[in-house]
């Protein structure tokens, strides 16, 4: 028996992979509906279709351009991006797992352990705590993972505060916007179209998130009105984090498996699900296997994030000037952010002046 706590993309996709290999899998979800509450922008690269083909009803928009904005510059780059309805995407993955044989229990909250192979879970619908026997437990329960805490796997990992809201805004529905510079310290801002008159506008930062968000909102929309909040924490990848301890495993946000450059965690979690599935089936060390298969990429994202945080507004202006060249745009079109190693190698080969920015790392 394998119990997965959390029916987000990481938990549900892992449940699908394990179930189709004949494993008995139960997924506990503390909310009454899968995919709620929404705490994600839901924008991914075309790399997601290396894992499965998305159903049309999951896709809100397909975008072919990103507008990159700094204090003193603004450029347009051709890309292939997908904006998803996050609640429908989560349900789509859960349905895949259910069809493969996994069982889902909404309104069930993990409470703690009652021995090595027994967990306590609260059925919130009837307000009753149950003991459930299991051989393996996987925490796919987000940045404040209760499973990690109960297993003694907490650490000093950091989280960005991701403030996002739906707002009324007319913008080009074939492109999204990213904002960098001193108004967006240590991370960036974004504006992603959902429909002709609605956008997902957000910002990530370590502190003063509300002030930075409302300044951005007023500057971009001319008002402080929002339709609804979709905020949440964005884990910063921690290469030292323990993600397996005996028969307890962590995946997704609970394992900080997030790109530090963009805050995107969906595709890293899907990759991690394949790694963890193999580790469980073949009894391999997940701590080591994950680092071998995905750790280098996520560490590279972290290194890039660390020196981007040292950039001045003038530096961002210079960076965008180099990125505006057609030879650079072709590389950015060919390699997306989910393939960072070939992306950076080819950028440096095509434009050696990018090496200037490496001085910011020292």
Image: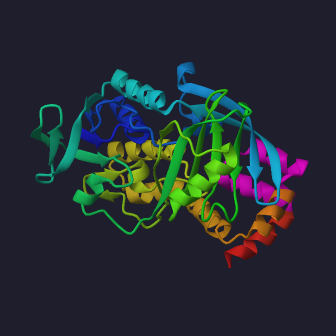
Residue 193 against residue 178 in the figure, above or below: above
Q: Main secondary structure of the magenta part?
A: helix
| The C terminus, quarter of image | bottom right
Which contiguous range is marked in magenta?
A: 322-351
- Judge whether residue 181 is colored magenta: no
* Viewer-closest of 95 and 276: 95
| The N terminus, quarter of image | top left
List x then y, in percent, for residue 333.
77, 42
Examine the image and state in which quarter residue 183 appears. bottom right
* Viewer-closest of 168 and 3: 168
Q: Residue at x 61, y 62 (%)?
A: 300
Observer able to see residue 126: yes
Residue 4 against residue 16 in the figure, above or below: below
Query: What is the residue that sits farthest to the bottom in this orientation?
Result: 362
Q: Residue at x 83, y 64 (%)?
A: 318
Total number of numbered discs in the rendering: 0
List x then y, in percent, for residue 49.
59, 32
- Judge whether residue 337 is colored magenta: yes
Residue 294 against residue 11 in the figure, above or below: below
Q: Residue at x 68, y 46 (%)?
A: 220
């Amino acid at each position: 028996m394998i119990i997965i706590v959390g029916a987000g993309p990481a938990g549900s996709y892992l449940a699908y992979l394990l179930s189709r290999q004949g494993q008995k899998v139960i997924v506990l979800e503390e909310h009454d509906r899968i995919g709620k509450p929404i705490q994600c922008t839901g924008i991914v690269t075309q790399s997601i279709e290396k894992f499965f083909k998305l159903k049309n009803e999951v896709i809100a928009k397909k975008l072919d351009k990103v507008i990159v904005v700094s204090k003193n510059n603004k450029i347009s780059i051709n890309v292939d991006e997908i904006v998803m309805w996050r609640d429908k995407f989560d349900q789509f993955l859960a349905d895949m797992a259910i069809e493969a044989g996994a069982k889902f229990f909404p309104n069930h909250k993990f409470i703690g352990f009652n021995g090595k192979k027994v967990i306590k879970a609260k059925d919130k619908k009837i307000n009753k705590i149950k003991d459930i026997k299991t051989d393996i437990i996987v925490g796919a329960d987000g940045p404040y993972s209760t499973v990690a805490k109960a297993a003694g796997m907490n650490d000093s990992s950091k989280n960005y505060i991701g403030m996002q809201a739906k707002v009324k805004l007319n913008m080009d529905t074939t492109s999204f916007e990213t904002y960098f510079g001193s108004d967006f310290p240590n991370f960036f801002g974004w504006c992603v179209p959902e429909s002709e008159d609605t956008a997902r506008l957000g910002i990530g930062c370590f502190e003063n998130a509300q002030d930075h968000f409302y300044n951005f909102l007023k500057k971009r929309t001319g008002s402080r009105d929002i339709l609804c909040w979709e905020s949440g924490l964005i884990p910063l990848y921690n290469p030292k984090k323990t993600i397996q301890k005996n028969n307890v495993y962590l995946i997704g946000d609970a394992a900080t498996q997030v790109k530090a450059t963009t805050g995107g965690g969906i595709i890293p979690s899907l990759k991690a699900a394949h790694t963890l599935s193999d580790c469980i089936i073949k009894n391999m060390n997940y701590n080591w296997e994950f680092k071998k298969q995905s750790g280098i990429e996520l560490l590279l994202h972290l290194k890039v994030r660390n020196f981007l945080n040292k950039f001045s507004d003038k530096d961002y202006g210079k960076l965008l000037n180099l990125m505006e060249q057609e030879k650079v745009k072709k590389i950015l079109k060919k390699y997306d952010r989910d393939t960072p190693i070939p992306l950076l190698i080819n950028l440096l080969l095509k434009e050696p002046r990018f090496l200037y920015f490496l001085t910011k790392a020292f």
